Image (cartoon, rainbow, N blue to C red):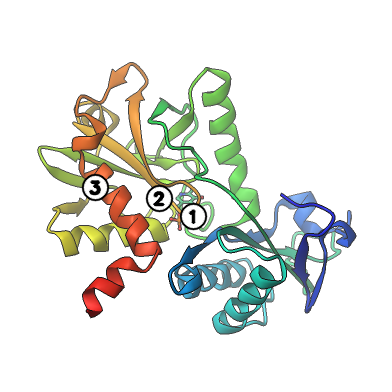
Amino acid sequence: YYNEQTVIYQNGQFIKAKDATANVYSQSLHYGNGVFEGIRAYHTNEGTKIFKPYEHYKRLKFGAGVMNIPLAYSEEELTQITYELLERNGLKDAYIRPLVTTGVDMSLFSSKESNLTIQCWEWGKYMGDKLLRVRTSSFQRPNPKSCFVEAKVTGHYINSILATNEAKNDGYDEALLLDMNGNVAECSGANVFMQKDGKLYTPPRGHIMAGITRSTVIDLCREEGILVTEKHFTLEELKQADACFFTGTAAEVVGLQSLDEYQFPLAWEKTHGYQLMKLYKDEVLGLRQKRKAS
Ligand code: PMP
């Protein structure tokens, strides 16, 4: 993730990653009270472009807001800092990780002090390019009445880590989690879509991360005439689907080979997921916008 030369942004300054420090009395380390984002920048024909920075930083500010963590930067300022950080690191294609941690405070009331760091590194597709073998997790996604499921709070990711550990230790690539009502929710760090009889279905907001890739893919479907419906479905329904794929900033669009013992029958190249994987790539590279303009 970093080497001797790597530069990060920390509280108003660009410093060497190796010189960055974190306080062991930080509430973030003790209680997981922090918020973060996962963003990508792509090397396009028009130079390096961060994909949907405003949407990502809006979500970061929403998370800070609900957690009562001060974050006095606008979306525009954060975007501008990120472009400068990419330039200072000479990165064209990058994964960007802004992280807001809280100050020194052992109480359970959010500290008035916060620290912003932004890190970036080169990162291939997080879940790779191969079709995934997925395990249904024995862990449910958190109850939306227990926390803000749409906020990317560091502590929430313990649920994702438990599910991923269980799946990987059992020989699978990834985990699929259900919500508290037993409906399909999402992967540990990505949203889920299923294809049945030529149509796509994805769980509605409420128990899931409101993925920015998810909403980009829904928009792409609408533009391309692929029918997509946001509705709850069960594990039993998913195990009768023709195909399934995950979406996320880090994972982009990635297909599933199997879920537990069930093999998705439709060849990946014949699925909407495959088509959307390519459309998504064009979208992040600005190629679709260019075609629309010309
Ligand atoms: N679900 C979870 C639990 C996630 O952590 C993420 C990554 N932020 C996603 C879905 C996908 O969201 P996005 O497309 O905004 O990266």
User: What residue would you read off at disc 2?
Assistant: 207
Q: Amino acid at mark 3?
A: Gln
SS label for mark 3 = helix
Between tags 3 and 2, which lies in front? Answer: 3
Real-space Cα separation, disc 1 to disc 2, in angstroms: 6 Å
Residue 62 visible from this viewpoint: yes
Residue drawn 41% across and 27% down? 134
Q: CA distance from mark 3 to mark 2?
A: 27 Å
Q: Earlier in the sequence, mark 3 or mark 2?
A: 2
Place residue 237 in its image quadrant.
top left
Instruction: Kindly tell me whether mark 2's CB lies below 8 Å from ligand 1.
Output: no
Relative placement, left or right, of 133 versus 63 is left
Task: State the CA–CA distance, disc 1 to disc 3.
Answer: 29 Å
Residues 272 and 206: in front is: 272
Vertical placement of 117 versus 271: above or below? below
Using the image as rendered, state which of residue 213 and residue 88 is in the foreground.
88
What residue is shown at x 20% (from left), y 24% (from top)?
Answer: 265
Q: Which residue is mark 1?
A: 149
What's under tag 2, amino acid-wise? His
Mark 3 and ligand 1: say if the CB distance to the nearest ligand atom is below 8 Å: no
1 and 2 marks in contact (CB < 8 Å): yes
Disc 1 versus disc 3: nearer the observer: 3
Q: In the structure shown, which secondary structural element does the residue marked by tag 1 occupy?
A: loop
Packing grade of label 2 (10 A; few <14, some 14-19, many >=20) is: many
Q: Which mark is residue 275?
A: 3
Horizontal side of 75 relative to 110 (left or right) equals left
**Dot placed on the residue nearer the N-terminal end, 1 or 2:** 1
Q: Secondary structure at mark 2?
A: loop
Give the amino acid at mark 1: Val
Q: Position of residue 273 (x, y in %)?
A: 26, 43
Q: Which mark is residue 182?
A: none
